[in-house]
Amino acid sequence: MRQGVFDILDKLNIEYEVTEHKAVYTVDEADSLDLSAHGKGTKNLFLRDDKKRNYFILVLCNDKRADLKAIRAILDSRPLTFASEEALHEMLKLYKGAVTPFGVINDAEHKVQVIFDNDIFGYDRVGEHPNDNTATLWLNPYDLKKAIEYSGSETKVIDLGSN
């Protein structure tokens, strides 16, 4: 699965660096690897509305809280909650601990929208799993957005404010 990510980045001539590491399942575990010299860590939340009609991956800085009520208001959405592991695997072919916006490469029907908090665009490089939680891929956030859009998925940039 990770090779598909690398293939897209290479096709788009996007520069990236890969750091191999032990499997991590949470932001705390990823933070314990102390990879901050490579760039800003992110966290990715797989969300859905209460009717299971709209699915989102929210990408934000790893040290930022996500207020689902505020996000709902910004997106003008129905109430939001975390999507199930089953939906994660069915729609994106990912598993818990490996949620990444690159998962939309596997979303042939483009059901999942990727939402970026604008704070990540203040960093030169951000870290994302390449559809595998045993590596972190470091790239420019604008290039990340470009790669996601190339896959055919809709993106949106929102302002979650500071917290």
Image (cartoon, helix red, strand yellow):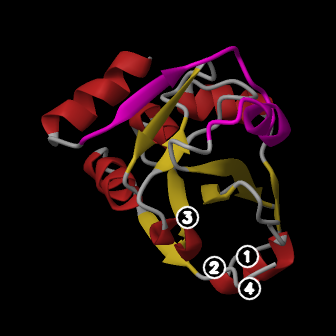
Task: Answer with mark 3 or mark 1, whichever residue precedes in sequence.
Answer: 1
Q: Which residue is mark 3?
A: 115
Residue 125 appears in the rendering: yes
Rounded to the nearest angstrom, the CA distance separating label 1 from label 2 is 6 Å
Rounded to the nearest angstrom, the CA distance separating label 2 from label 4 is 5 Å
- The part of the chain drawn in magenta is 15-35
Amino acid type of the residue tagged 1 in the rendering: Ile
Amino acid type of the residue tagged 4 in the rendering: Ala
Task: Answer with mark 3 or mark 2, whichever residue precedes in sequence.
Answer: 2
Q: Mark 3 near mark 2, Cβ–Cβ under 8 Å?
A: yes
Q: Mark 1 near mark 2, Cβ–Cβ under 8 Å?
A: yes
Q: Which residue is mark 1?
A: 71
Residue drawn at (84%, 72%) of the image: 67
Q: Mark 4 near mark 3, Cβ–Cβ under 8 Å?
A: no
Q: Which residue is mark 2?
A: 75
Q: Which residue is mark 4?
A: 73
Quadrant of the rendering where the N terminus is positioned: top left
Q: Mark 1 near mark 4, Cβ–Cβ under 8 Å?
A: yes
Rounded to the nearest angstrom, the CA distance separating label 1 from label 4 is 5 Å
| Mark 4 or mark 3, whichever is nearer to me | 3
Amino acid type of the residue tagged 2 in the rendering: Leu
Rounded to the nearest angstrom, the CA distance separating label 4 from label 3 is 14 Å
User: Which of the 4 image quarters holds residue 141?
Assistant: bottom left
Q: Mark 2 near mark 4, Cβ–Cβ under 8 Å?
A: yes
